[in-house]
Image (tube, grey):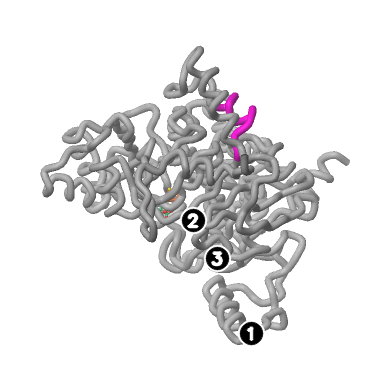
Amino acid sequence: MKAKNIIEKLWEQHVVRQEEGKPDLLYIDLHLIHEVTSPQAFEGLRVAGRKVRQPNLTFATMDHNIPTVDRFNIKDPIAKKQVDTLSANCAEFDVRLLDLTNEEQGIVHIIGPELGLTQPGKTIVCGDSHTSTHGAFGALAFGIGTSEVEHVLATQTLWQAKPRTIQVKVDGQKKPGVFAKDIVLAIIQKFGVNFGTGSIIEFTGDCIKQLSMEERMTICNMSIEAGAKAGLISPDEVTFSYIKGREYAPKGEKFTEAVEKWKALASDEGAEYDQTLEIDANEIEPVVTWGTNPAMSSYISKTVPTFESCNTDSERKSLERALDYMGLTPGMAIEDIPIQHVFIGSCTNARLSDLRDAASFIKGKKVSPNVRAMVVPGSQKIKRIAEEEGIAKTFVEAGFEWRDSGCSMCLGMNSDLVPQGEHCASTSNRNFEGRQGKGARTHLVSPVMAAAAAVYGHFVDVRKLQEEAVR
Ligand SMILES: CC(C)[C@H](C(=O)O)[C@@H](O)C(=O)O
Ligand code: SF4
């Protein structure tokens, strides 16, 4: 039998209709929903007099435009309307919803895995680009548009053209001070923001195998920033033990049976891909983005690029525009970039392990008087555990604000904004112009790099600080 990769296996298992020259019709196992991209889809159902085909496979949360302090008091009328509309739609169409009163509420891509809804072998969609996060479990998970949300609600299926497959092989061992965020930013730095266009990426290699589920999620989360439709990782023991015992995970004998099926999903030895790219984890340093897309980044020991590094006129223009927006000088050291805001949050880096890593750096230190820093846990459950563990106290004593969960400062859709012209060290995934507010200057980093920037008021090489601590 021909060796197959996991993408081919997942695709074959979900095609319910196939015709020459047309996209395939895929069955969808899990449909996640949030307040921003679902109102028109439900409205479409209402107008057509249709029901949600499989309410038991549909799951909603509110996350994007909710406040992270005084959460029941939504001041922005548009945000309030979206949140209220989601509640009304879920009640009318019988869809489970984690609303603001629910102890399990959180960012959609955090709660799916946390509740055990996200499992290997599933097709998972959501009207949200970072649905790729769920691929970390060996699921085929991708973002869809609002009209597709309506199609999935009505039929539990989706038309999809078969994508190309790319293997991104990460071998070697990541060094202390280097995190999953640095790996994925380094991949995007090396291969660009478009290398994944029209493709699904499977991340493979020794380095990936050694990562925890939380770290794998950070990597798959950002596959979309490489232009890919989805990113995934073949499931293994790390995956199975993360899922075991979670609320919606199979239990007892059913779990054992599921694991057998999940094991068979992993890419076969010798499986082929349309393209293979490689990167050596040994060479990766902590990464900081200096520009306005996630590939515009440098290692912490390096500098902002100069115009001499540009090969073409268009490269020169885009560098000029990015540096102008970011208010940076060509050739300046990354360590000299001043920081006024620090945001530890988002579906990329607001899981418990991220907060633990940042808190262990922060312990006994103080946020610089020039910095406003906040931690926004990815879910209320993470918030609760962090409070029990004393992590919250560590952050608060250092001078961080400690918030309720939500997308928060990851995007300017709620009241957590970065003022015009100010710099923010952010653990989120997008540094586009205006992403954190009009004129806001975003630098993407790992949680520990963000925590260090909060203390020093500029970027610092956390590896040097670790060496000093040992000495
Ligand atoms: C609002 C939503 C549609 C959007 C997305 O699709 O990704 C958001 O989550 C983002 O991160 O930009
Ligand atoms: S945390 Fe950010 S990236 Fe994730 S879903 Fe929310 S807005 Fe999108």
What residue is drawn where x is 69% and y is 50%? 169
Position of 129 compared to 182: left or right? Answer: left
Alpha carbon distance from label 1 to label 2: 31 Å
* Label 1 or label 3, whichever comes before in sequence order: 3
* Mark 1 lies on residue: 312
122 or 471: nearer the viewer: 122
Q: Which mark is residue 163?
A: 2
Label 3 amino acid? Asn
Q: Dividing the image into 4 quarters, which one contains the C terminus?
A: top right
Alpha carbon distance from label 2 to label 3: 14 Å
* Mark 3 lies on residue: 194
Position of 238 compared to 400: left or right? Answer: right
What residue is drawn where x is 39% and y is 29%? 104
**Decide: marks 1, 3 in contact (CB < 8 A)?**
no
What residue is drawn where x is 60% and y is 55%? 166
Question: Which region shows up in magenta?
Answer: 234-242
Mark 3 residue element: loop
